[in-house]
Image (tube, rainbow, N blue to C red):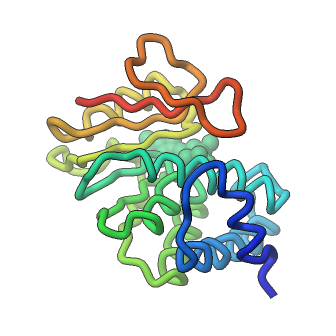
Amino acid sequence: MPTLSQTELAALLAPFAETPAPVLAQLSTYLDLLLKWNARTNLTAIRDPREIVARHFGESLFTGAHLPLCGTLLDFGSGAGFPGLPIQLLRPEIRVTLAESQNKKASFLREAVRTLGLQTEVWSGRVEDMPASRRFDAVTLRAVDNPQAAMAGASVRVAVGGTLASLTSDVSGAADALLLPRSTDRYLVMTRC
Ligand SMILES: C[S@@+](CC[C@H](N)C(=O)[O-])C[C@H]1O[C@@H](n2cnc3c(N)ncnc32)[C@H](O)[C@@H]1O
């Protein structure tokens, strides 16, 4: 039995994005795998399945729903896959790369990609160690330590005319900031580069 029914998933995600039934089924599989791994290794501090769905899945899908058309996307410091993996499920036309420097988290990401039958690339290492020529139409950034350094590292990976999408409470100087559903102080900030 899945931890949450698809009806429950749909209700929790309704404030964030319209989520087609096949995507709900994949998110259910992803949630169960995440809970299984999180019981023995610390992938996310949020333990409650409903909160994982509302915070991690919801904010990721909201981001995916607002991204412009793009062919490639880098998720900088993906952790347990947020926001890159739910974006991959919602936007299968995008070639997503999940970059994560911690081995155990990168192992989880590879297992999630395999279980979900995706072609998503997992870059197991620091983004700074990618070939300098690699650029992406969109780069996402959420909850990465040392935000200033991360922003700088993420910006240089955005192709000309591409989008840097960051989930943050710091909106100083932002031209395009969308308040995240169920939040009073967290935003999706999208910057054209
Ligand atoms: C706090 S976690 C957040 C993960 C995820 N983005 C989320 O919102 O749940 C930040 C992750 O970024 C990874 N990270 C930090 N700097 C990185 C870098 N330069 N390249 C790749 N991964 C990085 C860390 O290993 C950590 O797992």
Identify the residue shown where x is 21% and y is 46%: 135
| Residue at x-position 79% and y-position 73% | 4
Question: In the depicted view, which residue is nearer to us: 119 or 64?
Answer: 64
Counting from the top left corner in percent of width and height, residue 132 is at 19, 44
Image-quadrant location for residue 81: bottom right
Name the residue located 53 percent from the left edge and 40 percent from the top edge. Answer: 142
Q: Quadrant of ligand 1?
A: top right
Most extreme residue toward the bottom, as rendered?
A: 1
Against 166, residue 34 (above or below) is below
Of residues 19 and 143, the one drawn nearer to the viewer in this rendering: 19
User: Would you say 87 lies left or right of 193 here?
Assistant: right
User: What is the x, y in percent for residue 114?
Assistant: 49, 82
Depth check, front residue: 107 or 169? 169
Q: Residue furthest top?
A: 173
Q: Residue at x 45, y 29 (%)?
A: 189
With respect to residue 34, does 156 lie above or below? above
On the rendered structure, is 158 left or right of 8?
Answer: left
Q: Quadrant of the N terminus?
A: bottom right
Instruction: Report the number of discs.
Output: 0
- Residue 157: x percent and y percent? 26, 40
Question: Picture coordinates of residue 187 (x, y %)?
Answer: 56, 30
